[in-house]
Amino acid sequence: MKQVMFLNGPNANLYGLDRSGTYGSDSFPQIEAACLARAAELGFALDFRQSNHEGVLIDWIQEARQSCAGLLINAAGLTYTSIPILDALLSFDGPIIECHMSNIWKREPFRHHSFISKAATGVVAGLGLRGYLLGLAAMGELIDEPAQ
Ligand code: DHK
C-alpha cells in the first residue's frame, strides 16, 4: 500500500478553538480522523502529523522523501516565510498538494504570497476540511499516475 504524508504547521492544533471561525468548527483531532478515514477509503496509508516547529517539518519532509509517494502540506504561517521548507519540498520527487483551510487570498495581504507554491503540484484553499478531503482524493489519483 502506498504511503502519503500530510503535514500541518504551527497552530494547526488549535483549529476549531479559534472563536473567529476562520478555520471552521472541527477540532484538529476530528480533522485528522476524517482524513485518515478518507485515505483508507481511497486505498493509501496516511501519516498525518502536526508541528509548531519549522525544523521538525523539514525533517519530516526529508523523511517523506524516503518513504512516501505523495505529500500534502499546510505549512500555516510558515507558508509566507520559509524558504527552507520550500527547499525541502523541492527535494521531494512525488506530487505535493499545498492546503489551506481558509481562502488566504481573501485575507490580509501578507498571506497572499506563498513561498511553497513553487514546489506544489496544486493548491487547495478556502474549503476547510472539505478541501483537505478533496486534496486527498486528488492525491489518490496523482500517486497512481506514471511519473512525469
Ligand atoms: C493556516 C494558518 O495557521 C495561517 O497562518 C495561514 C492557514 C492560513 C490555513 O488557512 O489553513 O495564514
Image (cartoon, rainbow, N blue to C red):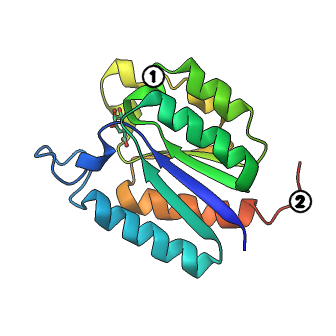
Judging by the rendered image, the residue that carries numbered circle 2 is: 146
Q: Work out whether residue 70 or residue 132 is closer to the camera in this orientation and state it.
A: 70
- Outermost residue on the left side: it is 19
Helix, strand or loop under label 2: loop
Residue 142 lies left or right of residue 25; in this view the side is right
Give the mark, 2 or 1, whose residue is nearer the N terminus.
Answer: 1
Residue 144 image position (x, y, % from top left): 79, 66
| Label annotation for residue 140 | none
The correct choice, above or below, for 34 with respect to 89 in the image is below
Where on the picture, by quarter, is residue 47?
bottom right
Q: For the residue with label 1, is its CB less than 8 Å from the closest atom of ligand 1?
A: yes
Residue 32 image position (x, y, % from top left): 39, 63
Helix, strand or loop under label 1: helix
| Label annotation for residue 80 | 1
Q: Which residue corresponds to the image point at 72% horizontal and 66% vertical from the top-left?
A: 141
Residue 118 image position (x, y, % from top left): 66, 28
Residue 109 lies left or right of residue 18; in this view the side is right
Total marks shown come to 2
Pointer 2: residues within 10 angstroms few (<14), some, or many (20+)?
A: few
The correct choice, above or below, for 139 with respect to 38 in the image is above
The alpha-carbon separation of the residues under discs 2 and 1 comes to 31 Å
Amino acid type of the residue that numbered disc 2 sits on in the rendered structure:
Pro
